[in-house]
Image (spheres, helix red, strand yellow):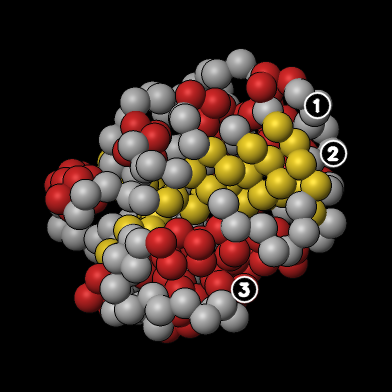
Amino acid sequence: MEIFVVPTPAATGSVAAGILAAVVRSKPDAVLGLATGGSPLPVYRALAEHSVDMGAVRGFALDEYVGLPAGHPESYAEVVRREVTERLGLDPARVSVPDGGAPDPQQAAADYDAAISRAGGIDIQILGIGHNGHIAFNEPGSALDSRTRVENLAERTREANARYFASPADVPTQCITQGLGTIMEARHLLLVVNGADKAGVLAAALQGPVTTDCPASVLQRHPHVTVVADEAAASKLLPGSGGVNVRVADTAVGV
């Protein structure tokens, strides 16, 4: 595992975008795992500034709310359309999001997991981390080998996401999420983290025990993880602990 520590949240977007651009240049039809949320979204804005052809790229979103009407501005289908597909010039037919409006969400989840496998798996999966250690919407208690499924959202997660909705009561209670086992099958994991409020959970995930109490701790078992964190988020990491290589980075990094 390698961690790049940068001064600001804007720099995390630039560094992570450089990594993604390098992947696409080396494999123009790369399969990207797409995350939304406060930390990953600046990555796409920075990636749009790179002169890289994204037309053959395929994308799979990490998750989607269950029960939002089609076209709801806070559905991840709409966020991905606005922030990723249109911004980067991806082919909409090659970008997939779980169907949170399906009559049978459990079957939709299983179908989505199978679609990722048929595509040959994810080349590089972008991730954020929640305050309770979730990645995607794998809440504490999620099995470390879990597959794409319907998940109940923790109250802490709903509170964190309430800022995107008119009222906290409007935040859905369920989602379809890629499972931890699904995520771990990606060939490269790229975790982007910003803010002092994430410092404790980031340290627990990367240097604490691997436990279902902190789902992101499963990343310690993956052979190729890159973390890009601002100084505030990285402030509780112990250099050299747990085999983690912490480096100070600039905005030209590509791995």
Q: Which residue is drawn at 44% across and 50% down?
A: 125
User: Residue beneath label 2, please?
Assistant: 235
Answer above or below: position of 43 versus 146. Answer: below
Answer above or below: position of 159 versus 245. Answer: below
* Amino acid beneath label 2: Ser
The reply, left or right, for residue 66 in relation to residue 251 is: left
User: First in sequence: mark 2 or mark 3?
Assistant: 3
SS of the residue at dot 2?
Answer: loop
Q: How far apart are marks 3 and 1 (CA)?
A: 29 Å
Would you say the residues marked 2 and 3 are in contact, meaning their CB atoms lie under 8 Å apart? no
Q: Distance between the residues labelled 2 and 3?
A: 24 Å
Give the percent coordinates (x, y) of residue 242.
Answer: 67, 19
> Which of the 4 quarters of the picture holds residue 206?
top right
Answer above or below: position of 29 versus 210. Answer: below
Query: Looking at the rendering, in which quadrant would you find the N terminus?
Result: top right
User: Residue beneath label 3, please?
Assistant: 46
**Residue that extends furthest to the front in the rendered view of this protein:** 26
Give the percent coordinates (x, y) of residue 224.
Answer: 49, 36
* Amino acid beneath label 3: Ala
Q: How far apart are marks 2 and 1 (CA)?
A: 8 Å
User: Residue beneath label 1, please?
Assistant: 238
- In-front residue for pair 70/148: 148
Q: Residue at x 59, y 80 (%)?
A: 49
The reply, left or right, for residue 20 in relation to residue 235 is: left
User: First in sequence: mark 3 or mark 1?
Assistant: 3
Q: Decide: few, some or many residues near mark 3? Use Cα within 10 Å; few <14, some 14-19, many ≥20.
A: some
